[in-house]
Amino acid sequence: MGRRSEKRAPVDGPPRADALRRVEDRYWAQEVRSAVFCGVLLFGALVLLDWGLLRLTVVRAGWWAALAVLLLIILTPPRVSAANGGLDSRGLVTHSWVRTDRLVTVRVSQGVSPRLILTDTSGARLILDPRCLVANPLLWHQLDQGARQSAEQGTLRCGIPVLEQLGRRIDVEMCRGILRNSALE
């Protein structure tokens, strides 16, 4: 019985079978339902208030509906998915896509709500909430796998510590979830 050697596909060769699998944010639909609920609740409260004060008109109801739609647009999160060595983010008015296997920089923006900023070799840029990756370990796995390829190829020049820190955070959250679900915490 001889040793088995695994042949690796070249970097520019056909994509691997695990890279073909499409992974999506599993909580996106729930967050959209919450956004719709908030919009409907705001519209209902404003119409009831106006009706109770005897000031409700068709024009005012139209303004309240427009305000509720604006709230819905603001609260609707982008739909994040990963497939074929890329990470995709689709908002209501925006669309961004980067190749994770050709990343150049990964950094975290400083501010009230930190954002992960990914840039690939073609100049494409994707801004992502790190909480999405924490809540979706399969998305994180796709990003991590592509970032490792980028590091091996030498294209990832800036951001390896950021990814390592995010990886540790995701590992801690996964362990907490496992302990919580098994009632050991």
Image: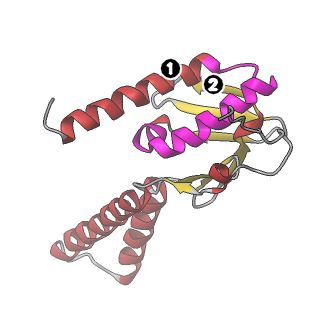
Identify which residue, 91 or 69, lies in the foreground: 91
- The CA distance from mark 1 to mark 2 is 11 Å
Residue 155 appears in the rendering: no
Magenta highlight on residue 94:
no
Residue at mark 2:
107
Asked which quadrant contains residue 154, the reply is top right
- Give the residue type that dot 1 points to: Gln
Residue 156 image position (x, y, % from top left)? 75, 24
From the viewer's perspective, is residue 52 above or below residue 84?
Answer: below
Q: Considering the numbered disc 1 on the image, is that residue within a helix, a strand or a loop?
A: helix
Residue in view at x 65 percent, y 55 percent = 94
Residue in view at x 50 percent, y 29 percent = 114
Residue furthest left as drawn:
183
Residue furthest front as drawn:
1
Residue 11 image position (x, y, % from top left)? 82, 38
Q: How many marks?
A: 2
Secondary structure, magenta segment, majority class: helix
Q: Which mark is residue 165?
A: 1
Give the left or right position of residue 118, taking residue 48 as reference: right
Residue 172 image position (x, y, % from top left)? 35, 26
- Give the residue type that dot 2 points to: Arg
Around disc 1, counting alpha carbons within 10 Å, would you say few (fewer than 14), some (14 to 19), or many (20 or more)?
few
Residue in view at x 48 percent, y 39 percent = 133
Give the left or right position of residue 23, taking residue 96 as reference: left
Q: Find the magenta span and give its range.
A: 131-160
Around disc 2, counting alpha carbons within 10 Å, would you say few (fewer than 14), some (14 to 19), or many (20 or more)?
some
Residue furthest top as drawn:
161
From the viewer's perspective, is residue 3 above or below residue 93?
Answer: above
Identify which residue, 111 or 90, lies in the foreground: 90
Give the left or right position of residue 25, taking residue 20 as reference: left
Magenta highlight on residue 157:
yes
